[in-house]
Amino acid sequence: MIIRIVRMTFREDKISEFLAIFDQYKEAIRKQPGCTHLELLQDYNHTNVYSTYSYWDNEEALNNYRHSETFGKVWPATKKLFSAKPEAHSYLVRAKID
């Protein structure tokens, strides 16, 4: 399993536009083959910073999403709202503690 975290910093006046985009597409993203979890997080101290936190079965599933029609709609609409370059990190789950 891969955990993908994408940290995005938005212009203050564009946050509501981003939230509308996320709300519109969150179910389509969750239904992508290989996506088993999706959350939107807001930075505690910087209210214009958000991160998506998602679980993917494997790198192939993540890459298939990144080449999907859904991503082709979400990413271009989202990236025009940034005030800083986004950061994306992928992590392998090595141990799970319940």
Image (cartoon, rainbow, N blue to C red):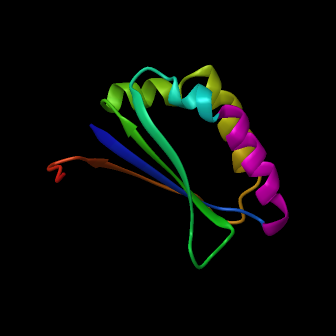
Residue segment shown in magenta: 12-25
Is residue 33 positioned above or below 26 on the image? Answer: above
- Tell me the residue at 52%/23% (across/down): 31
Left or right: residue 30 compared with residue 74: left
Nearest to the observer: residue 53 or residue 79: 53
Taking depth in this image into account, of 6 and 97 the one nearest to the observer is 97
Residue 70 visible, this orientation: yes
Q: Position of residue 94 (x, y in %)?
A: 15, 48
* Rendered location of residue 6, percent (x, y): 50, 52
Identify the image quadrant of residue 23: top right
- Give left or right: position of 23 versus 40: right
Q: Residue drawn 80% across and 55% down?
A: 16
Q: Is residue 26 left or right of residue 10?
A: left
Is 42 displayed left or right of 59 in the figure? right
Residue at image location 81% in from the left, 58% down from the top: 14
22 magenta-colored: yes
Q: Look at the image and tell me in which quarter the N terminus lies.
A: top left
Secondary structure mainly formed by the magenta segment: helix
| On screen, residue 24 above or below 5 | above
Q: How many marks?
A: 0
Task: Please report the residue visible at 14 percent of the width from the left and 50 percent of the height from the top.
Answer: 95
The picture places residue 29, in percent across and down from the top left corner, at 56, 30
